[in-house]
């Protein structure tokens, strides 16, 4: 059982942004399933009125490239899965990760 975080990578012109979307505990299979669900449903920007979404798996399923077409713009983001490898507080739970 690992500790996982899903991050979203966004780029707008010269600006690059990485945000944490979700934290949870589970097996690698459970984490990949959660990542896929997030890639298919998460809105990377408030107010985005989705018209079409395309989700592409990268590699073995630890990342997805997503193109979301809205009414006014298209958002292109990458969702990545990361497992906690080390922490100064290994006993802390998900509530302390944010």
Image: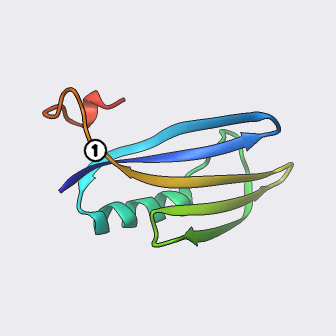
Image: 1 above or below 54: above
- For this view, does 9 lie left or right of residue 37? right
The image quadrant where one finds the C terminus is top left
Taking the view exactly as shown, the residue that stands out farthest to the left is 91
Q: Which residue is drawn at 72% across and 54% down?
A: 76
The percent position of residue 97, horizontal first and vertical second, equals 31, 31
Q: How many marks?
A: 1
- Residue 44 x, y percent position in the rendering: 62, 45
Nearer to the camera, 77 or 88: 88
Q: Tell me the residue at 49%/57% (across/down).
A: 38
In this rendering, would 52 be left or right of 32?
A: right
In the picture, measured across the screen, residue 55 lies left or right of residue 38, that is right
| Position above or below: 56 against 9 | below
Residue 91 point in image, percent of width and height? 13, 33
- Residue 61 as seen in the image, left or right of residue 41: left
Q: In which quarter of the image is the N terminus?
A: bottom left
Identify the residue under disc 1: 85
């Amino acid at each position: 059982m690992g500790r996982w975080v899903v991050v979203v990578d966004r780029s707008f012109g010269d600006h690059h942004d990485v945000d944490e979307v979700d934290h949870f505990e589970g097996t690698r299979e459970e984490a990949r399933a959660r990542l896929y669900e997030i890639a298919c449903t998460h809105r990377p920007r408030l107010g985005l009125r989705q018209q079409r979404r395309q989700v592409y798996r990268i590699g073995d399923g630890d990342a997805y490239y997503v193109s979301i077409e809205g009414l006014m713009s298209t958002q292109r983001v990458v969702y990545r899965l990361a497992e906690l490898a080390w922490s100064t507080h290994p006993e802390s739970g998900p509530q302390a990760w944010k």
